[in-house]
Image (cartoon, helix red, strand yellow):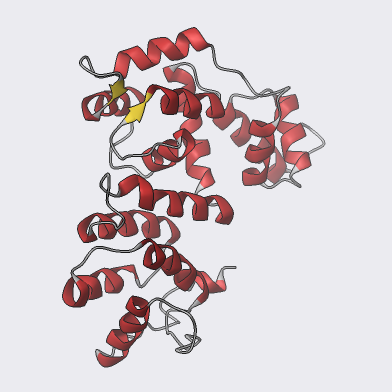
């Protein structure tokens, strides 16, 4: 690595630490992504020749450790044990990212197929590899496209079975979790508005459109288009902000829309 600059050497070491890859594989991935770490992770985990394939027997052992004794699924107690084993708080957003990889249909439960799907996609067949992949899963939240996929996945994952809408308290909790990661400065005002004026379940359309609103409308709301095709709830939120004089100072907050 003596021909590399200091920043490049640091990225190689960071990549090797997070992925467990060799120096050669780290250099290959970083060069392929023009030295962008997030792109290098994507490259690394998409390459069959350098991706580690999980041992099915080891996956079976992991699944049996966490599955419920009375049903062929991993439920709350099993997920709590898993979190203890990988040293992650159950409320940590990385558990949402993990559930996204598993394509889990419901919060707080994993079918055997979902568990295997997620761990095989991540190249995990041991607790050690599980812990090693956690920084990678966190890094995926920094990718705009993946964050959007995880955000939209969260709606179906968090809602009650058989319901079309997401309970307001659950939606607020998920927004606070997701937008804390993306630092949308208006998230607290949005949640306060919902509790004061709406107090009803959230539709999928409102859920998905709010992400676009947060990405494109600045915190002063100066570029908000009242004639745009926003859900009525977002229109009412803007009115609420104007009526109450709660317009964010652009100099005191960093707009997500200006980061793009």
Q: Tell which of 94 and 194 is nearer to you.
A: 194
Q: Image quarter for residue 95? A: top left
177 displayed left or right of 80: right
Vertical placement of residue 80 versus 159, above or below: above
Vertical placement of residue 134 versus 64, above or below: below
- The image position of residue 144, as x and y in percent, is 56, 56
Looking at the rendered image, the quarter that the N terminus falls into is: top right
Instruction: In the displayed orientation, state which residue is furthest to the right.
Output: 3
- The image position of residue 134, as x and y in percent, is 46, 34
21 displayed left or right of 2: left
Vertical placement of residue 65 versus 139, above or below: above
Looking at the rendered image, the quarter that the C terminus falls into is: bottom right
Q: Is residue 44 visible?
A: yes
Q: Residue at x 62, y 29 (%)?
A: 16
240 displayed left or right of 127: left
Q: Image quarter for residue 51? A: top right
């Amino acid at each position: 690595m003596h021909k590399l600059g200091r920043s490049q050497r640091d990225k190689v070491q960071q990549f090797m630490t997070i992925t467990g890859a060799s120096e050669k594989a780290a250099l290959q991935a970083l060069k392929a992504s023009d030295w962008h770490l997030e792109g290098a992770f994507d490259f690394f985990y998409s390459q069959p020749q350098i991706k580690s394939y999980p041992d099915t027997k080891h996956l079976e052992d992991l699944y049996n450790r966490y599955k419920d004794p009375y049903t062929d699924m991993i439920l709350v107690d099993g997920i709590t044990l898993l979190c203890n084993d990988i040293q992650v708080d159950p409320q940590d957003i990385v558990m949402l990212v993990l559930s996204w990889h598993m394509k889990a249909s419901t919060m707080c439960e994993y079918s055997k197929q979902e568990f295997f799907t997620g761990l095989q996609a991540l190249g995990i067949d041991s607790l050690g590899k599980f812990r090693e992949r956690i920084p990678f899963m966190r890094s995926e939240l920094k990718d705009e496209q993946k964050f959007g996929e995880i955000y939209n996945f969260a709606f179906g994952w968090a809602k009650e079975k058989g319901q079309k809408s997401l309970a307001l308290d659950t939606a607020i909790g998920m927004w606070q979790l997701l937008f804390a990661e993306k630092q949308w400065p208006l998230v607290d005002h949005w949640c306060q508005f919902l509790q004061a004026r709406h107090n009803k379940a959230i539709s999928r359309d409102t859920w998905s459109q709010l992400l676009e609103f947060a990405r494109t409308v600045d915190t002063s709301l100066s570029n908000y288009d009242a004639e745009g095709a926003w859900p009525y709830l977002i229109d009412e939120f803007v009115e609420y902000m104007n009526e109450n004089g709660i317009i964010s100072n652009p100099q005191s907050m960093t707009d997500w829309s200006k980061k793009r």
